[in-house]
Amino acid sequence: MKISRYGEEAIRILFGDKIDLEIHDKVRRYYFFLKSLQLEEITDIIPSFRSCLIIFDRRKTSYEALRASLQDKEFLIAHIEIPEPETHDVPVEYGGESGFDIDFVASHTGLSEDKIIEVHTSVTYKVFAVGFLPGFPYLGILDQRLYVPRLETPRLKVPEGSVGLAQLQTGIYPFESPAGWRIIGRTNKKLFDYSEEPYSIFQIGDEVRFIRA
Amino acid sequence: MIEIIHPGIMSIVVDGGRHGYREVGIPTSSALDLYALSVLNHLLGNKCNAPAIEAFGEKFSLRFGKDVCCAITGARMRASLEGRPLRSWMSFEARAGETLTVDEVMEGFRYYLGFSGTPVLEKVIGSYTTNLECRFGGYRGRALQKGDRINFEGTRIAAVQPIPEEFIPRMMPPHTLRVVEGPENDYFTDESLKEFLGGKGRTVFTVSTKLNRTGIRLDGKPLAFRADVEESIISEGLLPGSIQVPGDGLPIIQLHERTLGGYARPVLIAKVDHDLLAHLKPGDSVMFEMIGMEEAERLFDRKMEIAASIKN
């Protein structure tokens, strides 16, 4: 664990230096440890692939005090209850107008459209992080055979529900938004609902299976 | 009640922001100039992070449907109420049927209009602020348009008062933004960082036209990555005010709409200067000055003390 300061009001904790399930599991445990403490001086937590960012209220604590207090309580990590991850099935219409980059992915990877779909649906993915946009899941780890680079210049708009690939990740756009990932399909599953907690259907550590619609 | 006659270039409902849900990617989407928002609400007798209209561009105009106390802060401007001259950083009484018009913005970019009372709008995830990109919060999740009407509850006539000049920040370019070290400071060559942050002869950047509530792209001499690092990082938590540098080396100042980022962050803007980011406009010159963390804390605390002293 590497602890450092990021700006006046955040503590950044690194748990490793790569995208890896074990490292991510440590991030997730730490995130639930932080939640279990229910400290009012912590205003936000952003867990991701290999790090936890803790945003605190400097009127209520200081970097030094919060860091020391978290280190004092660390022994609790082994004892807290970690919720079981949920599994989500996501039906996807691949290719065609919904997956307008599938031809690019085919020519870049040398795989046929059917093979791309087969490979993409054969993995149970881990939600490594939720963010960029509200409810956007960063899913890994993608099969090496589907590795494609991001777009050099992001598109200004892709439709809500678009399923994209970038490097060794796959993800779903919960809103119509700008996008730098290659779009291979679309789902009609509602991913984000601002009227009801917890707002995002995906939480960190959840599992996702894509199903050909 | 108020009715929008002209929304300026863009106007939206904002407040102190949406907090506590960045873990699922919900950004704060707060007002960009929180100092201006808090002084505005002080003038109106509202809570310091209460909702207001954040606008930019001239011609903004609205009509009052009932007597209310109104105030303007943020950019320095000339405005008028039924032909009577007004300026920003003061409160005034408006009568039913009167029209307020923003005539000229002289210094700064975004301005804030507020009203005594609470707008009758739906709070979304604990806040009135607008997430424009995802179309929720604020007024039906979108920017204000001609003909939109907002009702207020608990309106009252508050004391009419101006804010003394010494409490009004300067927003005139060139802007010198103070920064503290970011997580990927060592991704860049020493020489490049020296040019970026050094005193004499440091790079002067220009605010590009690629500017919105998500971020501000700067033009100027690109930063140079060290040969032994990857240009992107594994995406992780991102703070407002961070400077992200993509592969082209040109800095992007991140505002309040992103929770995760994948670009290297050599520095981030010290909190004391976050409010100034609301006033960067295309063509403005921008320079950076590195300060230590203790100084950054001290400067921000001092600013908060000054803000609190307005109320005494």
Image (spheres, helix red, strand yellow):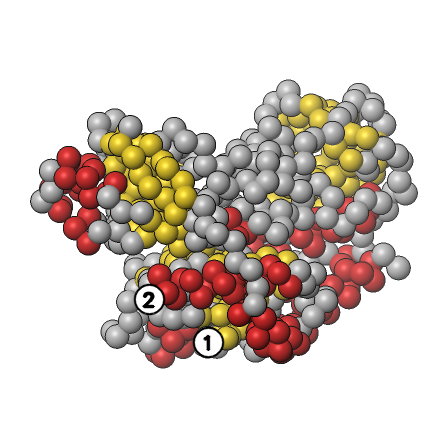
Residue type indicated by callout 1: Lys
Disc 1 with disc 2 on a shared chain: yes
> Mark 1 belongs to which subunit?
A
Mark closest to the chain's N terminus, 1 or 2: 1
Q: Is residue A99 left or right of residue B278?
A: left
Q: Which mark is residue A2?
A: 1
Report the chain holding disc 2: A
- Residue drawn at x 27%, y 38% is A183
B1 over B306 or under it: above or below: above
Q: Is residue B308 visible?
A: yes
Where is residue A149 shown, x and y percent of the image? Answer: 22, 51
Q: x%, y% of residue B25? A: 50, 48
Q: In percent of the image, x 36 and y 36: which residue is there?
A: A90
Closest to the observer: A198 or B68? A198
Q: Judge by depth and name the residue closer to the eye, B7 or A92.
A: A92
Identify the residue shown where x is 22% and y is 31%.
Answer: A95
Q: Secondary structure at mark 1?
A: strand
Dot 2 crowding, Cα within 10 Å, few <14, some 14–19, many 20+: few
Q: Are marks 1 and 2 in contact (CB under 8 Å)?
A: no
Taking the view exactly as shown, the residue that stands out farthest to the left is: A110
| B130 vs A82, nearest the viewer | A82
Task: Say what amino acid the circle numbered 2 marks.
Answer: Lys
Disc count in the image? Answer: 2
Vertical placement of residue B132 versus A17, above or below: above
Across and down, in percent, residue A125 comes to 33, 49
Q: Which residue is mark 2?
A: A18
